[in-house]
Image (cartoon, rainbow, N blue to C red):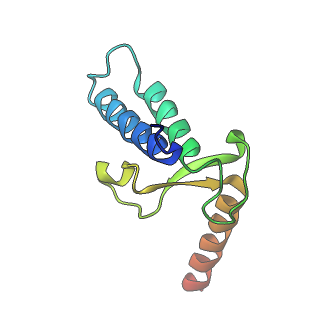
């Protein structure tokens, strides 16, 4: 019996999330916090099939980043359920829109 690839990808994300949390606490063994984050980021990108959550385009891993859907200051904001893939093009346009909105409020 073979498992669904999406289920396996989600399980891999949770596994790497806990490894990242251990590395952040200093109990990560031989893996640094940065290396643990990169592994976790790649797992999220694979889970999302390298598809931007904003525009839906499939991009290369160098054109994608991982962002929280609902930003918070807590560690739970980095859980796999809250992280999504966003391409650099959508990320830049969202940043421009936010800056323009802030400027219009100040005026």
Q: Is residue 57 left or right of residue 27?
A: right
Between residues 23 and 4, which one lies in front from this camera angle? Answer: 4
Residue 65 in the image: above or below residue 21: below
Between residues 87 and 101, which one lies in front from this camera angle? Answer: 87
Please give the name of the residue rendered at 41% of the width and 21% of the height, measured from the top-left corner.
32
Between residues 16 and 38, which one lies in front from this camera angle? Answer: 16
Q: Is residue 68 left or right of residue 100?
A: left
Number of numbered markers: 0
Residue 66 in the image: above or below residue 98: above
Between residues 102 and 27, which one lies in front from this camera angle? Answer: 27
* Residue 12 in the image, given as x and y percentages of width and height: 43, 37
Kindly give the residue lying farthest to the top in the view shown.
Answer: 30
Please give the name of the residue rendered at 60% of the width and 47% of the height, measured from the top-left corner.
65
Q: Which part of the image, by quadrant, shows the C terminus?
A: bottom right
Q: Which part of the image, by quadrant, shows the N terminus?
A: top left
Kindly give the residue lying farthest to the front in the view shown.
Answer: 1
Please give the name of the residue rendered at 62% of the width and 48% of the height, measured from the top-left corner.
49
Q: Is residue 105 left or right of residue 7?
A: right
Please give the name of the residue rendered at 60% of the width and 61% of the height, measured from the top-left corner.
53
Residue 87 in the image: above or below residue 23: below
* Residue 2 in the image, given as x and y percentages of width and height: 48, 37
């Amino acid at each position: 019996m073979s498992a669904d690839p999406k289920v396996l990808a989600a399980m891999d994300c949770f596994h790497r999330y806990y490894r990242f949390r251990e590395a952040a606490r200093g109990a990560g063994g031989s893996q640094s916090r940065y290396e643990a984050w990169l592994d976790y980021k790649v797992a999220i990108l694979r889970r999302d099939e390298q598809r931007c959550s904003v525009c839906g385009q499939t991009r290369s891993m160098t054109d994608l980043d991982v962002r929280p859907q609902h930003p918070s200051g807590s560690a739970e904001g980095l859980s796999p359920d809250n992280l999504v893939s966003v391409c650099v093009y959508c990320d830049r346009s969202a940043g421009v829109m936010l800056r323009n909105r802030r400027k219009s409020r100040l005026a």
